Image: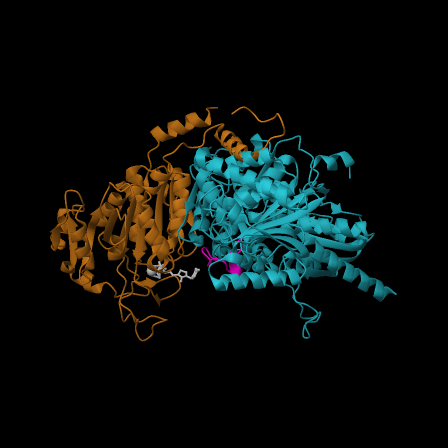
Chain colours: A cyan, B orange
Amino acid sequence: MNATAAAAVPHRAAVDIQQHIVEIVSDSGEGAQRCGQSLGSIAARMGNGVWTTEIIPAEIQPPARSIAGASGNRIRLGSTSVTNGGDETDLVVAFNEQVLLGRVREGELKPGCVILLESMWREHRDAGIRAAYAETYERLVNDGFRVIEIPMERECLKIVSDARKGKNMWALGMLCCIYSLDVALGCEQVAVALKKKSAKVIEANQKLLQAGFAWAEENLDFKYRIPAIKATEPQVVVNGNTALALGVLASGMEICAMYPITPATSVSHYLSDVFERVGGLVHQAEDEIAAAAFTIGASYAGKCAVTVTSGPGYSLKQEAIGLAVMAEIPMVVINVQRGGPSTGQPTKVEQGDLLTVIYGSHGDAPKVVIAPSGIEDCFYSVITARKIAETFNMVVVVLSDSSLATAQTQFPRPQFDEEWQAPPVDQSPVPAGAKPYDWDEFTGLFQRMVPGQPGGMHTITGLAHDRNSRVAYDPATNEEGLRHRSLKLAALQQTLTTPAVFGGPEGDLLLVGWGSTRGAIEEAVTRLQAEGRSVSSLHLTFLQPMPSGIGEILRRFKHVVTIENNWSDRLSDDIINHDNRRYSALAWMLRGRYLVNVDCWSESRGRPIKPVDICNEVRTRLEKMRGTRA
Amino acid sequence: MTSNATSHLMRMFEEQHSLEDYQGGVPRWCTGCGDNAILTAVQRLCRDEDLRPEKTVFVSGIGCSSRFPHYMKTYGFHGVHGRALPIAQGIKLARPDLHVFVNTGDGDCCSIGAAHWIHAIRYNMNMTLMLHDNNIYGLTKKQASPTSPIGTKSNTTPRGSYLDAMNPLTVTLGVQNASFVAQAVDWIPDMLYDIISAAFHHKGFSFVRIIQRCPEFMPKAFDPWLNDPQRSLLLTHDDGVRPSPAIAKLYRNQEQHDPADIDRAREIASDAETIPVGILYRNPSIPCYEDIRLAGARRGPGMMRAGLEAEFDKFTIWPDGQQPAA
Ligand SMILES: Cc1ncc(C[n+]2csc(CCOP(=O)(O)OP(=O)(O)O)c2C)c(N)n1
Ligand code: SF4
Ligand SMILES: [Mg+2]
């Protein structure tokens, strides 16, 4: 470390680190969320890469000081851009020991990590609380955590009369000090975060932030610095759901029909707030079936529309989606996946819907499926989805998940493109003799006739039909329709480019992922390569259709394993064998299409997959491979 | 060559439509099926109102009755079972310039689509719904429907149906924002026409229940009313429909009923013995959902970009010195 820089800090030198994961947990309503988000914003403004994730209790108002009630934020700070939530937490601020226990039990804290714990409970008037605190404290210390008790409440009360309102900002100040963040930027961020509050409130919170900063400066014996490179281009910082909603705004669509469901709801909350300003609207339908049908009606009438949902809602929409497929009406469906089946785990992540969206709805119902692999991708996917939907008269499913939904990171501010806008509704007369389904022999494409177009009158139907849209059950016509609807996927497939391999083009092991796991997989691959291992990865955004060239890539590796956040049977279970094993979704598809012996490694723990777990799995596999070869 | 816009205008002013202009495929309903009478009335209406076929959409679900759009030479949407209403609503909200009609059956509307029916009343979007109520599932070959009278023998209730029939009129009249509720019967075609016409002219969600005979599966269902015209109650009013002298002579059981009177409308609707024919209720002052939702500015050029940039601004971190002045 640079000697002069160290001398400039009176108490101790800041240790340079490349990245750190910090958590703030509290009872809900104590502002840990806001503290965490603000920390992320300040760091982002200083040029650090950030990835913040929400820690959400399952209940709206869980009892205070309960293990299941942890509410807060987890912020990963990096020297360069951060693409995922990383491994376990390095430092945690907890407003009480019970919510902290929740995080310990979930295995989210790194062994020996620093815990900054509110100490007021030690002297609480309730003996039960005092005892619970003391016991937990002892246990954590014995378990090897570095627990530092902090009189947050007491310090806050020096400035405000109700510490519940403001402790979060005091903690923010403390964290700004710990991570050598600019306190002035911190104060600015407080003003931004509280912009709806009075000047007096903002001022009090800024004082708290400064006090927290000063207290840490005086009393803590460690300090970090995560070197940052300021961006030269403007960046936006949003979570995946906001990115999806911005994507809807940018896609040229005007109508979003939805029914509330976690974790998709915040897409429509944000849209409801802003859509009307650009001449759009959100329609909250009476159920998901109605939302899907409404979307289809609007699209049919010439305004390609979108419906937003999650698993249970997607299941309900399936019949309507089949109608859109059959009648060839463009439609965008956003599915922010959550844990399933049934009501499952509403707030937790799972990539459990891939096969449902690709093969779902009865009969042969070809649809396009795109899975954004990051926050920025969420934005652009919706724009792409609308374009494809209208060009191919198809249903396009955008498959996000709850880990992207609430994770926040920065990406370059998009540059508006005139091409994003939807074309005006075609109201020109239809040429004499034109047929409503004038399928192109080669691509299956046709020019749709929209109500209002003179001469185009016809009745569309979900029944089998011919080129004139007349109901027809004869074998040839039925196959003609099936064939052309299917050809469109192939036509789209021809326009897709082969995804790039991350790492060497061939080797011992290829990891294949899709959707939200990209950041974690590529980070794991980077670490494994640094260890000298022959590992690469491939990430798929287009799941249906899949671009050309994937089979060739798979065959260049000795082993191929998909990494997925969904269920697959474990061969370690006695009755599971190669004949009855149920593979993860993508593994099924790759095996079926490319006839490559693709294995899978999956987790369904309701949380994002961590790079460290991928690394461990890969190391074990590579060791085994070496063993079998020897 | 004239431009598209000009030719449009010319069509608008010059075009007069004849019945054939609205006749699509040849109806495949059974002989004597009441759906035929509804089709005739609607085709007449389109001609008399000179509705531009390309500006008119018939939306339906699944059922015998839902084949209706195929027989109209307008735009049509033959959807999935029970979901005609939300499809129609999407169409109307996207394109308020279109005339939207919904044709649905007693199973389609009152059973599988019941949630949408209730909410459609509340939305009060400007469209006309025709409930082809034959008291049975026709297309699937005779199963009890929610409106089948108790004791109806069907393939799923061979010893008679178990429950009292649902009354679509009282249900509709009981929902918030009901704005037009009427009933017609397929065997009085002139009044059927008048009622559908009044429904079409009402601005809002017009609910017309049409008692529709299904000679195939419910041949005797309405015999008591057919055999005894006095068991029908003609609702007449200056503000409602007025039967022709010929009809008035045959159906002498009449009542001067003011469609503004919802209490009396509910009483009339509740009487299971008589079939009221006419307009039970009309309230033109209830706002339409599309008018409420589309009250703001429609998308104009530049709007999307300006709105999007303003949203990006909310989330942007500017590099030093690049933040635009507010
Ligand atoms: C989801 C679904 N469930 C069931 C059916 C089968 N189905 C088609 S029409 C119908 C009932 C039709 O009865 P109604 O709505 O009264 O129409 P009608 O044939 O009497 O005119 C049923 C059950 C279907 N097409 N779709
Ligand atoms: S089955 Fe009944 S409702 Fe269906 S077409 Fe025949 S008569 Fe009409
Ligand atoms: Mg019926």
Whereabouts is ligand 1, in terms of quadrant? bottom left
**Residue A381 counted in the magenta span:** no
Q: Where in the figure is residue A517, as x and y percent of width and height?
A: 65, 51
Q: Nearer the viewer, residue A131 or A278?
A: A131
A256 with respect to B188 (left or right): right
Q: Quadrant of the N terminus of chain A?
A: top right
Q: Where in the figure is residue A466, as x and y percent of width and height?
A: 51, 50
Magenta highlight: main SS: loop
Q: Which residues are magenta?
A: A55-71
Q: Where in the figure is residue B129, as x and y percent of width and height?
A: 32, 49
Q: Where in the figure is residue A255, as x and y percent of width and height?
A: 45, 41
Q: Nearer the viewer, residue B21 or B213?
A: B213
Q: Nearer the viewer, residue A216 or B243?
A: A216
Tell me if residue A522 can be seen: yes
**Residue A61 counted in the magenta span:** yes
Q: Quadrant of the C terminus of chain A?
A: bottom right
- Name the residue located 49 percent from the left edge and 47 percent from the top edge: A266
Tell me if residue A88 can be seen: no
- Name the residue located 57 percent from the left edge and 32 percent from the top edge: A419
A403 with respect to B275 (left or right): right
Question: How many discs appear?
Answer: 0
B224 with respect to A431 (left or right): left
